[in-house]
C-alpha cells in the first residue's frame, strides 16, 4: 500500500501495489541512473620498484633476474660486492606484494613459502626478512649492502640510500 | 611377588638422559643465539606403518631437529640431529650433519665438520630420510642406505670439503672432500688413511643435472669387515665410481644413479660390485604417483661388504601433500609384497 498525492483532487490517496507498480519501477530506474554517476573511481595504477642498497653496483635487471636473485635460486652472494643476498618481503598481504608475486615471481604465496622452506633445509639459507611498511623496507635495504626488496615506487624519495633496479606496474 | 618399584624405569636409562641433554642443548642454543643472530629451527617427524604376509607394525621413524644460523656474512652453521628408535625400548641420537661453512665468494666455499658426502644427486638434495617432507619416495634407495643401517656407501663424512660452483656457461659444480675413511666411527678415524671423494656435475639448463664422481679409500687391516664382523687382517683398497642424472620441474622428477665399487685385496684380488636406483614421479595438483627401482649386487667374494642386502626390485608409491608441511605416502614393494605407509610433518 502506498500514500500518493493526487494533484487533480489535491488529496492524498492510498493506492494498491498493483496500481503503483509503474511508480516503483520508475523510482528504481531513477535510482539506478543516479548511482551510475556516483560509481567508485577505478583503482590508481601502482608501480612497484625493486630496490637494492645504493652501494650495490649491480646492473639493472629484468623480470627473470630479479626472480632468480630474490629467491636465491642459483647464487647466494652478490658477485659485485661479495655480500650475501638478503631478500626482503612484506609481512602482511598488500597490493605491492600481490604485484610482486604475480608479475615478478609468477608464483602463488604458498608456493613461494614451500620453496623457501625447502631451500632453508637444503642450503641453510637465512630466512627472508619481513616488514610491515615500505618505510621499514627502505630503511633496512639502505643499511644492508646485500638486501633486495620491493616497495611502492611512490614511497621512494631522494637520498633514501637505495637504488631502483627494476619496476613493474599494474 | 616381584617388587614393581624396583623395576628400572625407562626414564632412568642412559639413552633417555643423552637425548634429553642433546635436546636441551639444542633448545637452549636456539633461545640464546636468537638474541645474538637469527637461528632457524626446523623440526620434522615421520610416523610409519607396514604390513606384509607375516608381520605388521606401526613405528616412529624419527624426530629430526634441524638448526642453522648465518653467523656472519660469510660464515654459517648447520646442525641436524635425529632421535630415532633403537633396540628394545631405547632410542638413539644420530648426528646427521653438523658443520660450518665459509663462503669466500659466490663461487667458492669451504665446509668443515660432518656433512653429507658429495656423491650422486639424491644424497645432497634430500639429505635425511627423516625430513621426509622432502624425500621423493617413502624408502631410501638401497644403494644409498645409511652405513649404520647396513648401507654400502659412506653417505656421510667427517672432514673438510671444498666446493666450486656456477662455473662456466654449463654451470659446473665441483666438490672435493678429504674425510675419515671406512672403519671410522663418530669419535674419529681408526687408521691414518683418509678418504678422498670428488664429484663433478653440470646444470646446462634449469632443472637438469648430470654428473659423475669418485671415491678413493684404503682400509686398514684392523678394520672390522661388514661381511664377517671380524678384522680384515689385510689392507684393502676401495675405489668407487658413479654416474648420475636428474631432471626436475613442477610436474616431473626423474633421477637415476649408478655406482661401481671395486675392492682390491691380496687374498681376493680385485672384486667388483654394483648398485643403482632410478626414480620417476609425476605431480598433478597435490598427488604424486611414482616408481622407484633399486639394484644392489655386492659380490659374495668381497672381503669387506656383505651381500646380505642385495636387492633388485620395483616399488610403486603415491605421495599426497596436504600442504607443504604435511604429506602422506604409501608404497608397495613388489619383490617382498610389503605395503608401507608414512605420515610426515614439518614445522
Image (spheres, coloured by chain):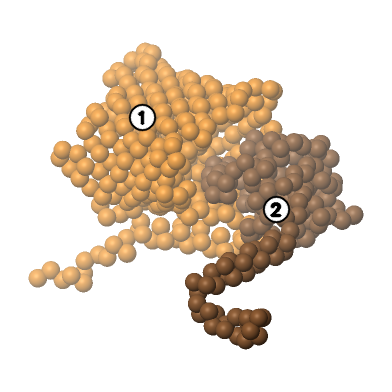
Q: Position of residue B79 (x, y in %)?
A: 53, 49
* Residue A35 visible in image: no
Asked which secondary structure carries label 1, the reply is strand
Residue furthest to the left in view is B1
Q: Where is residue B62 in the image (x, y as percent from the top left)?
A: 38, 50
- 10 Å neighbourhood of mark 2: few (<14), some, or many (≥20)? many
Q: Residue at x 31, y 47 (%)?
A: B48
> Is the same chain shared between marks 1 and 2?
no
According to the image, label 1 marks what residue? Answer: B291
Q: Residue at x 46, y 59 (%)?
A: B23
- 10 Å neighbourhood of mark 1: few (<14), some, or many (≥20)? some
State the residue in front, A170 or B28.
A170
According to the image, label 2 marks what residue? Answer: A96
What is the count of numbered marks? Answer: 2
Compared to residue B247, the image places residue A124 above or below, namely below
Residue B245 numbered mark, or none: none
Q: Which residue is drawn at 83% across and 50% down?
A: A162
Asked which secondary structure carries label 2, the reply is helix
In the rendering, what colour is chain A? brown
* Alpha carbon separation for disc pair 1 and 2: 42 Å
Q: Where is residue B155 in the image (x, y as percent from the top left)?
A: 45, 34
Judge depth for marks 1 and 2 and give the one in front: 2
Instruction: Identify the chain of the residue marked 2, using the numbered disc in the image.
Output: A
* Residue A66 visible in image: yes
* Chain assigned orange: B
Amino acid at each position: 500500500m502506498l500514500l500518493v498525492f493526487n494533484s487533480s483532487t489535491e488529496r492524498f490517496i492510498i493506492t494498491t501495489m498493483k496500481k503503483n507498480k509503474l511508480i516503483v519501477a520508475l523510482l528504481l530506474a531513477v535510482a539506478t541512473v543516479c548511482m551510475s554517476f556516483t560509481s567508485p573511481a577505478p583503482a590508481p595504477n601502482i608501480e612497484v620498484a625493486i630496490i637494492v642498497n645504493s652501494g650495490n653496483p649491480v646492473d639493472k635487471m629484468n623480470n627473470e633476474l630479479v626472480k632468480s636473485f630474490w629467491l636465491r635460486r642459483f647464487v647466494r652472494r652478490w658477485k659485485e660486492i661479495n655480500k650475501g643476498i638478503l631478500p626482503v618481503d612484506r609481512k602482511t598481504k598488500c597490493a605491492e606484494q600481490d604485484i610482486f608475486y604475480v608479475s615478478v615471481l609468477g608464483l602463488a604465496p604458498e608456493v613461494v613459502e614451500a620453496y623457501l622452506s625447502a631451500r632453508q633445509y637444503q642450503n641453510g639459507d637465512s630466512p627472508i626478512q619481513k616488514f610491515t611498511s615500505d618505510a621499514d623496507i627502505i630503511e633496512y635495504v639502505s643499511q644492508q649492502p646485500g638486501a633486495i626488496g620491493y616497495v611502492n615506487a611512490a614511497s621512494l624519495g631522494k637520498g633514501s640510500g637505495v637504488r631502483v633496479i627494476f619496476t613493474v606496474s599494474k | 611377588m616381584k617388587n614393581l618399584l624396583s623395576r628400572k624405569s625407562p626414564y632412568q636409562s642412559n639413552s633417555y638422559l643423552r637425548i634429553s641433554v642433546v635436546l636441551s642443548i639444542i633448545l637452549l642454543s636456539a633461545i640464546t643465539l636468537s638474541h645474538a643472530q637469527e637461528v632457524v629451527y626446523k623440526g620434522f617427524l615421520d610416523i610409519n606403518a607396514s604390513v606384509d604376509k607375516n608381520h605388521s607394525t606401526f613405528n616412529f621413524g624419527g624426530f629430526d631437529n634441524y638448526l642453522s644460523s648465518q653467523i656472519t656474512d660469510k660464515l654459517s652453521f648447520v646442525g641436524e640431529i635425529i632421535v630415532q628408535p633403537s633396540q628394545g625400548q631405547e632410542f638413539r641420537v644420530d648426528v646427521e650433519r653438523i658443520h660450518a661453512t665459509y663462503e669466500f665468494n659466490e663461487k667458492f666455499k669451504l665446509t668443515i665438520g660432518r656433512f653429507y658426502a658429495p656423491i650422486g644427486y639424491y644424497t645432497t638434495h634430500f639429505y635425511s630420510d627423516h625430513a621426509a617432507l622432502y624425500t621423493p619416495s617413502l624408502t631410501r634407495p638401497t644403494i644409498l642406505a645409511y652405513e649404520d643401517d647396513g648401507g654400502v656407501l659412506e653417505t656421510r663424512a667427517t672432514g673438510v670439503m671444498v666446493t666450486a660452483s656456477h662455473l662456466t656457461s654449463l654451470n659446473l659444480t665441483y666438490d672435493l672432500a678429504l674425510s675419515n675413511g671406512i672403519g671410522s666411527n663418530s669419535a674419529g678415524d681408526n687408521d691414518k688413511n683418509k678418504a678422498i671423494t670428488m664429484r663433478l656435475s653440470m646444470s646446462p639448463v634449469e632443472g637438469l643435472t648430470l654428473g659423475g664422481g669418485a671415491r678413493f679409500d684404503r682400509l686398514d687391516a684392523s678394520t672390522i669387515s661388514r661381511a664377517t664382523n671380524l678384522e680384515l687382517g689385510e689392507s684393502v683398497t676401495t675405489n668407487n665410481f658413479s654416474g648420475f642424472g636428474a631432471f626436475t620441474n613442477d610436474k616431473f622428477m626423474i633421477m637415476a644413479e649408478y655406482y661401481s665399487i671395486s675392492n682390491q685385496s691380496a687374498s681376493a684380488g680385485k672384486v667388483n660390485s654394483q648398485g643403482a636406483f632410478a626414480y620417476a614421479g609425476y605431480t598433478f595438483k597435490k598427488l604424486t604417483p611414482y616408481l622407484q627401482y633399486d639394484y644392489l649386487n655386492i659380490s659374495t667374494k668381497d672381503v669387506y661388504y656383505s651381500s646380505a642386502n642385495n636387492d633388485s626390485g620395483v616399488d610403486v608409491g603415491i605421495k599426497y601433500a596436504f600442504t607443504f608441511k604435511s604429506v602422506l605416502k604409501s608404497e608397495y614393494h613388489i619383490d617382498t609384497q610389503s605395503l608401507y605407509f608414512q605420515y610426515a610433518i614439518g614445522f
